[in-house]
Amino acid sequence: MSLVVNHNMMAMNTARNLNSHYSRLATSTQRLSSGLRINSAADDAAGLAIRELQRADIATLQQGARNASDAISMIQTADGALSVIDEKLIRMKELAEQAATGTYDSTQRMMIESEYQAMASEITRIANATDFNGIHLLNGNLSGAVHNGNGLTATGKMKIHFGTGNDSAEDYYYITIGNATASALGLGNASAQDAGYSVSTQTAAQQALAAINDAIVSKDKIRAHLGAMQNRLENTINNLNIQAENLQAAESRISDVDVATEMTEFVRNQILAQSAVAMLAQANSLPQMALQLIGG
C-alpha cells in the first residue's frame, strides 16, 4: 500500500471494523439489559411474529382461567342459596307431616298452613333474589335450552368462554340452572294445581308429603348438576393453567436471551471494539510518516 496523504485507507478500514463491533456491542447491551433476544423485528422477524401470537394466547388463556373461576363463584352462590331452600323444604315436609295427622282441629291446622305458605313464599323470594353480578340464578332465567347472546343481555343457558378461539368443542360450554321457585317445585298457593299447594286439610297434607319429596329431588338434581359443573370448571382451570405455562415456556425459548451466551458475545465485541479504537489511533498517526519524508 502506497504512502499517501489524501486518503488513509488503514484508518478507514479500522473505522469500519470499529463501527461493526460497536453495533454488535450495542445489540448485546440491549439484549442483556432487556432480557430479550428479540427487541425489534430486525432481530428476528419470524420469531417476533410467533412470539406476539403466543403472548396473545397466553394472556387469553389466563383470562379464560379467570372466567372459569368467576363461573365457580357463581355456582357456589347458587348452591349456597339452594342449601337454604333445602332447609325450608325440610321444614315444609315437617309441617305437612304434622298436618297429616288427625289430632289437630281446624284452627290449629290453619296455623300450620300459615307457616307452610310462608316457607313457600320464602323459597320463591330466595330464588328471585339470588343473583351474581346482577344475573339472577334460580328464577328460571338460566334454565332455557337455547343460548342467545346477540343482545346486550344474553338469554337462555349461560355460556362460559375460556378458550382462545370460538370452537364449541374446545373453547366454551354451557351452564344451565333450573328454576327453584316454590311454584316451579310444585309447592305453595302459587301452584294450586299441584299436590303440594296446601296443608290446610288432612288429605291435602298427606298429598303434600309426596309433592314435597318430589320438590326435594328436583332441588337436589339442580345442586348435583351445579356440583358436577364446578368440578368440571376446576379441571378446566387446571388445564388452562398448564397450557399457559407450557406456552409461556415456548415463548421464552423464542424470545428470551441466553444470558451466558450473550455475555460471552458481549465480552468478545467489547474486546474487539477496544482493539479497534487502539488501532484507529495508530492508523491515524501513520500519514505523519509522509511529513517526515517531505520535511527531510
Image: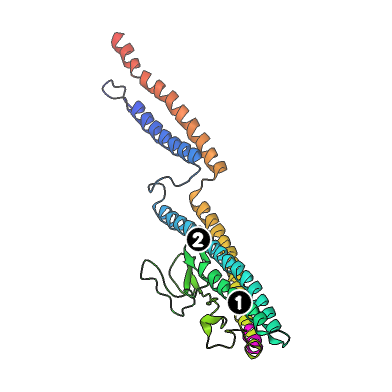
Q: Can you tell which mark lies on residue 114?
A: 1
Q: Which residue is mark 2?
A: 61
**Residue 168 magenta:** no
Give the image location of residue 167, x and y in percent: 44, 72
Q: Residue at x 63, y 70 (%)?
A: 83
Q: Closest to the observer: 161 or 283?
A: 161
Q: Residue at x 57, y 60 (%)?
A: 241
Give the image location of residue 251, x and y in percent: 50, 54
115 to the left or right of 41 = right
Colour scheme in the image? rainbow
The residue sitting at the right extreme is 103
Q: Can you tell which mark lies on residue 193?
A: none
Q: Closest to the observer: 291 or 89?
A: 89
- Magenta-colored segment: predominant secondary structure: helix
Quadrant position of the N terminus in the picture: top left
Tags 2 and 1 touching, CB below 8 Å? no
**Above or below for 109 versus 68:** below
